Each structure stands twice: as C-alpha cells, then as structure tokens.
Amino acid sequence: MNDVFIIDPDKNVLSRLNKELSSKDMNIHTYSDPRVALDEYIDIEPSVVVTEIELGVIDGIDLMARMRSLETDSMYIVYTNVQDPGVFREILKVGANDYILKDGHGSTRRLKKAIKEGLYHARVSIMLEKARREKQDFDQFLRVLVNALPTGLLVLDKDNHVVIWNKCASNITSIDGIDIHGKHRDDLPEIIKNLLDPAKEEIVLEKEDGSHFIEKSIHKIDLAPEMSGIIVVFSDTTELVTARQELESYLMEITETKDLMEEQAGKLALALAEVDKKNEIIEKQNEIMLDELVMAGKLQKSLLPDKYEKIGGLDIASIYIPSIHLGGDLYDILEMDKDITAVVIADVSGHGVAAALVAAMFKMSLHMKTKSVASPRLLFRLLNREMNSVLHEDYVSSFCFIYDRAVSGITFTNAGHPTPLFYRKADSSIIELDTDGFFIGMFDDGKYEEKTFPVQRGDKIFLYTDCLLEATDKNGRQFGKKRLKNLFLKTLGQTDGHQALETMKQNISDFTGKDHFDDDFTALLIEF
C-alpha cells in the first residue's frame, strides 16, 4: 500500500531521489531498466509510479500504457526534462495523474508532495473498496436468504411503506415486487391489504386456476424508532386444504356403500394408468436429455484443436476421452506471434456439465489474456484473479509453455498440474517439467514460478491429466508416475505421434482391466 516505483535511466537521479524521498511512510523501489520494473509491477502493485519519458528500450508513455492494461489502481507521475506539448498530450491520453519538470523550481518538493497525495489516495481507495465489498456481500446474502424462504414475506417500515416482498410472495399472489416496493399500505392492492388485516386469519385468493387458500401470521417489530415496522409471513395452503377435503370426502364415500368403494377402486386404476403414461413421458424426456448431452459432448470436442496438427514449428498429436458425455479437461494451442506459440493443458475439478462450463469459461478467458501477456507466469496470475471471483468450490490445475522458435527455447509455468515429461532426443533422457504454483481459482493471490528451458529438434513433451496417474487395477493400485515414465520411454522407442498416444492409452486400459476410464483421459505429444 506504501510502495513507490521510481523509473529513470539516470542512476544518479535514482540515488538522489531515493535519498531525498525515503521515509517510514513509503517503500521506494528504483529501476534504471523499465523492463525489470514492468516484470515486478504485477507482484508488488505499487500505489505510485514515477517515471521519466525517455527510458531507452521502452518509453515512459508505453510503459504506463502496459501497466494500465494490468487493471491496477496505481497513480502515475511523469518526472521528466521533456517539455514537448505533443508528448504532454500523449501523457494525458494514457492516464498520467501529474507532470513535473525536473529542472522546475522546487521540483523535488513538488514530487514528494504528489507522491504523498498518491499514497493517501491509495489508502482511502482501499478502505472505501473494503467497505463497499462488505456491504455488497451482506446485501447479497440478505437478498438470497429472503428469496430462498419457502414462505411469502412482506415487511413494512415504520412509515408503512413496503421494503421487502420476496420471490415466494410474488409466486403466491402473482404480484411482482417492482409494482409495490416503496408504496404506502393505503395504496396497495386489496389482497395485500387483507394480508395486513389482523382480523382476517385466512384469505381466499381467486386466480385463473381456481381458488387459493392463504394462511398468514402478523408480527410487529419495535427494536428502535428507526427499526420498527410490520412483518407478515404467509403461505399457500391450497394443496393442504384440498387434500383435507378430499380425505373427508373419501371417508364419507367408504362409509356409504360397497358400490362407492368399488367406484373409488376404479378411479385408482385410472390413476395408476395415468402414472404409467407419465412414466413413459419421463423415459422419453430422459432419452432426449441423453441425446442433448451426447450432442453437447460432440460440440465440446469440436472446440478442441485437431488430433494431428503442425503449428508454429510444433508437431502436435492429442487424445481426449471424457469419462461421461461432458468433461472438465481441455487443451489449446495458441499462435501468439510469428515465431511464438503457447500450449496449455488444464483440468477442472469435478465432472459433468458444471466442469464443462468452467472449462469453457477458462478457455474463453485464456484466449483474451494471451492477446496481451507473453509470460506464462503473468498469464496464470491474471487467470487466477479472474477465476477466483467466480469459482467457489471448484478449481483448475493447468500447465502452460510458450515456445519461441527463434531462440529454440520454452518458458513454462505449472499451476498444480501433473508434471509433463520432457524427452531429450540427444541422450534419450526423461526430465519432469515443474515449477511452484497453486491451483488456479483456489486462492485470492496465487503466486507462480516461471522457468526457461532450451529445446532441440526431435525433443518431445508429453502433457497429460491426472487420469493417467490415478487409473487403478482390480486391486486398487494406481498406475502412478513411475509406470508412466517407463511406458513413455518404451513407447517412443517403438512408435511416434498419435500412434504413440494410442499405444499408451491401450497399455493403461489393459492395466485397469476396464473398457472405460473413471476420469477424463487427456494427453498431448508435442515434437519440436
């Protein structure tokens, strides 16, 4: 909250400002290289950024634009010798908050004052945001709680105006809350006035489908002058009343004659026939739902890259077999630039429709973020921030590497995913690719490590989901990492490409003794 970035190619300027500005109220970070500042920006998220315009490899305007794109609340101060009006207009366009000339009278004093104002603004913004979120969370909880009640709820404030009319109340009376919220009790429809009348314990409401019986209870609240009012809790007892009336009628009929009992038996037979008919309808609906799930599964497969592809200098083979019609596994290959290609594999916790929806959300977010981020570590950081706000019990494990064909190297990051296996052709060795990092969507502020690794022509990477490790035989033993590494090395000595994946899949299937997998089976073999 008190972090300040100062970016200037002149190290003497940095040393002077660090000495003159340092205090217990701020943490000064100085950078002569704007690339280092940009790399650390996402981790530290400073409250204030002070930058020169002329920085060399990246100018100050471009630097502020990139920082702005990371959606933080930093304040930006330009501290420069440049006095060009055109540059000043560009500074305003990217959202700079202040502009101070180095050679101006008292420039250091004005810079210190501007920084303190920025830190104060940051502290106030954080407090306001915290208060807003707490109120928003409580209001959301209250709305969900009130609308989840199985009974109608009407609440009037001390001035007899409607303040609460829940969803169940609307369903019972067919009166929408928007039509009565804020109205005085004298202006309410007759049915609601009857609900507020203590003399009417039971109300009969005439609707298109017949008469409905409503039972209610009225309560007064008087906690304080500003917290007084009336609460009415009511429910539709039509089914209960109807059932009671039918029961009384049946008892009377049974006591009359044997003929009436036989008549009731006949009615029961008709009812059973109707049940059989409804069962047939339900079975047909189930068949329709199954067909729709199959179609959805086919659509999900169609959104994945082809089984055989050559993209950005990579030969790619893949297998995807969902455990049911819809799965939570996904993979994607993204051409980010002429010589730069990103490969991502992910596994959503859980199965079925919910996992498939999360996977689709993750894929959409992935495509958006890779347009502006060329670092897998920053990519996962941004994805975690976005997914954490929508996921509650689910999470996503993922592995991403970015291949730069121009330098023959990969940069990779792992977010709790099973470690991919790298096959070095030169010595036929197997290396596990791994970094530190938690699942995406599990924690508010996930941290991810990034590593760079050289590759050569003929090297291969094998990516997979946890189904391959957790597949069990009849005795409950898992296939495990050791068997998978041995199988991978053995298979590469016999075949390659998609046939290698098919061979590995068949070996794992033979180990389980089943003709299906209990989890989504996803694997990619990528050759450089």
Image: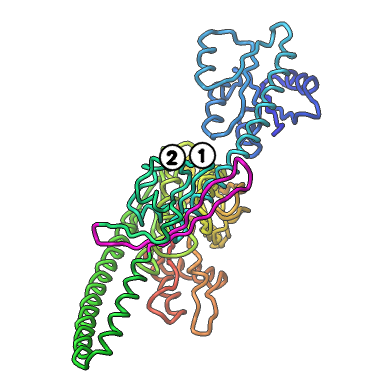
Spot the residue most to the bottom: 258
Q: Quadrant of the N terminus?
A: top right
Which span of residues is magenta-colored?
Answer: 208-236
Number of labels in the image equals: 2
Q: Is residue 479 above or below residue 201?
A: below
As drawn, the label of residue 159 is 1
Amino acid type for the residue under numbered disc 2? His
On residue 184, the disc is 2
Q: CA distance from mark 2 to mark 1?
A: 8 Å
Crowd tier of the residue under label 1, counting other residues whose Cα lies within 10 Å: few below 14, some 14–19, many 20 or above: few
Residue 503's place in the image compared with 402, above or below, is below
Left-right relation of 260 to 387: left
Whether residue 31 is visible: no
Q: Nearer the viewer, residue 267 or 70?
A: 267
Residue positioned 40% across, 58% down in the render = 356
Say if mark 2 contacts mark 1, CB within 8 Å: yes
